[in-house]
Amino acid sequence: MNSRTIAVGVFIAVALICGGATLRYRQAQRSPVSATANRSGSIGGQGVAGSPGGGAAMSWSSKPLGRHATEPERTAAIHCVQGLMGAFQRDDYAAAQQYQGAFARGEYRQVEKYRQATLKAHPEFAHQKSVKYGRAYADSGGRMVTLQTSIIDKDGKVYNRDFLLILENDGYRELSIANHPPHARGNI
């Protein structure tokens, strides 16, 4: 498979996932009880009051890729995120781009635009004190892994983030980053 075929496949998968989240979000808007009562399948997510980002709650599966990642998959995912977070901490966004998947890199080809977008969306990355790695989930073939993290900034504030990673050539690369609610996380 060439990288273009993989990128198109990833785009379609992300579009389907986002479409499902949007549908669940709209259903939750019509029925406020369902957004908080159904904790087994759908969970409140990005932008929950009191979490970074603010705004309305969204819903998505707590196990987005279906199975627990194997220890080698989890270790490789942690390696990717450690490299990414180290580059952010050093303010080396050219190095950080090396940990992005081809699809994500295509969004910000210029390093300074990537830096500005990252600092705007995730300022905690540049001001991190430590990162704890939690559960990891993978698709059936291990091509995609979601790694749950807790990022602690220099003021002690905790940011819970899910890193969606894709396997490319020599290892996992970052595809996207999302907030995740505390009740959906494992013990990190």
Image (spheres, rainbow, N blue to C red):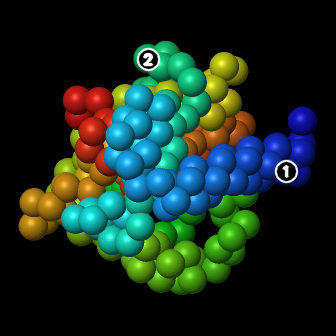
The disc labelled 2 sits on which kind of residue? Glu
In what quadrant of the picture does the N terminus appear? top right
Q: Which residue is mark 2?
A: 71
Q: In the rendered picture of this protein, how many numbered marks are placed on residues?
A: 2
Check disc 1: other Cα within 10 Å, few if <14, some if 14-19, many if 20+: few
Q: Nearer the viewer, residue 182 or 39?
A: 39
The disc labelled 1 sits on which kind of residue? Val
Q: Residue at x 71, y 37 (%)?
A: 169
Check disc 2: other Cα within 10 Å, few if <14, some if 14-19, many if 20+: few
Q: Which of pointers 2 and 1 lies earlier in the amino acid sequence?
A: 1
The spot of residue 19 in percent (x, y) is 69, 53
Query: Can you tell which mark lies on residue 8?
Result: 1
Residue placed furthest toward the top: 70
Residue 147 occupies quadrant: top left
Q: Residue at x 29, y 30 (%)?
A: 186
Q: Nearer the viewer, residue 176 or 51?
A: 51
78 to the left or right of 30: left
The spot of residue 176 in percent (x, y) is 56, 54
